Amino acid sequence: MRPFTDMTRAAQLPQRSVIPVNTIGRLSLYRRLLSDQLATGARQVFSHQLAALAVTTAPQVRRDLMTIGFSGSPRRGYAIADLVTAIDDVLVRSVETAVALVGVGNLGRPVLAYYANRQPIRFAAAFDRAPEKTGRVLHGCRCYASDQMTEVVAREQIHVGVIAVPAAEAQAVCDQLVLAGVKGILNFAPVRLRVPAGLHVENVDLMMALDRVAYFAHEHR
C-alpha cells in the first residue's frame, strides 16, 4: 500500500471505470459507518476496524478501497475524512440528484419523510393518480398528477425514479418513467421490471426479505 500524509487519494481511475454493484453497496455502508466514526471524534481507521464495523474482512475492505484508488498506511491506517470524501465522489454524493416518487401511499409517504432534507438526494416531485393528493406538498415535495410526469421530470432534471405502487401497476409506471427520461429506478413493488439495457434498477422486495428472515429464524430455533 502507498503511504500517505494528509490525503490518501490516488490517481483517479481511468475513465471512471464501472464499479461492481456489490462494491458500490459496501462503499455506501463504509461511508455511513465512517461518518459515524467522525461524529465521535475519530480521525484514523484501520482496515480491520472498518471490517469489524461492516461485518466483513480486512482484505475485502482494502480491495474495495483500492477499487476507488484509495490506499492507506500500515502504521496510520486511513484518514477518515479524506476517505469519506473519496467515497462521496464515487457515489456522486457531491452532486445533487433529483428524484421522483411515484405512489404517495402507505409506503411512499414514509420514503418522502425519511429523505426530507437529506442532501444531496432531493425528492423534486411525487406523482399519484388520486386527485386528493395532487397539488399538495408532502415533506417538502410537491405531488403532481401522473399525466404530468414527462413535463415535470424534464423541468426538474430528474434522473432517478422511485416506484411505490402495487405490483399490478409497477410496469406501466416504470414504462412511463423510462419515457420521461429517468436513468435509474428504485423499485419497491414486488415484481421484476422490464427495462431497456443500460438502465439500472434496484429491487427492494420487503415481503421477500421478511420471508427469508422468518425462514432462517425458524430454522435456528
Image: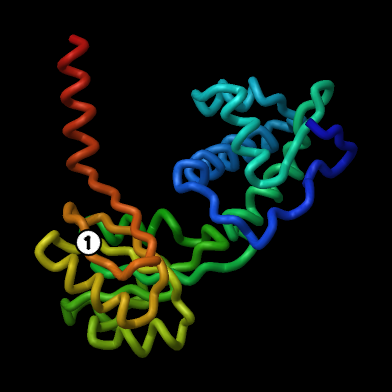
- Residue 37 position (above or below residue 28): above
Type of the residue with mark 1: Leu
Q: Of residues 206 and 133, which is closer to you in this image? A: 206
What is the crowding at mark 1: few (fewer than 14 residues within 10 Å), some, or many (at least 20)?
some
Residue farthest to the left, as pictured: 168
Residue tagged 1: 193
- Residue 177 position (above or below residue 90): below
Residue 140 figure quarter: bottom left
Residue at (17%, 33%) from the top-left corner? Answer: 211
Residue at (64%, 36%) from the top-left corner? Answer: 34
- Residue 22 position (above or below residue 174): above
Residue 206 figure quarter: top left
Task: Residue 36: give x, y in percent of width and height.
Answer: 61, 36
Q: Of residues 32 and 191, which is closer to you in this image? A: 191
Horizontal arrangement in the rendering, residue 218 relative to residue 48 (left or right): left
Horizontal arrangement in the rendering, residue 152 relative to residue 102 (left or right): right
Q: How is the image coloured?
A: rainbow
Task: Residue 85: give x, y in percent of width and height.
Answer: 70, 50
Residue farthest to the front, as pictured: 14
Task: Residue 205: give x, y in percent of width and height.
Answer: 23, 47
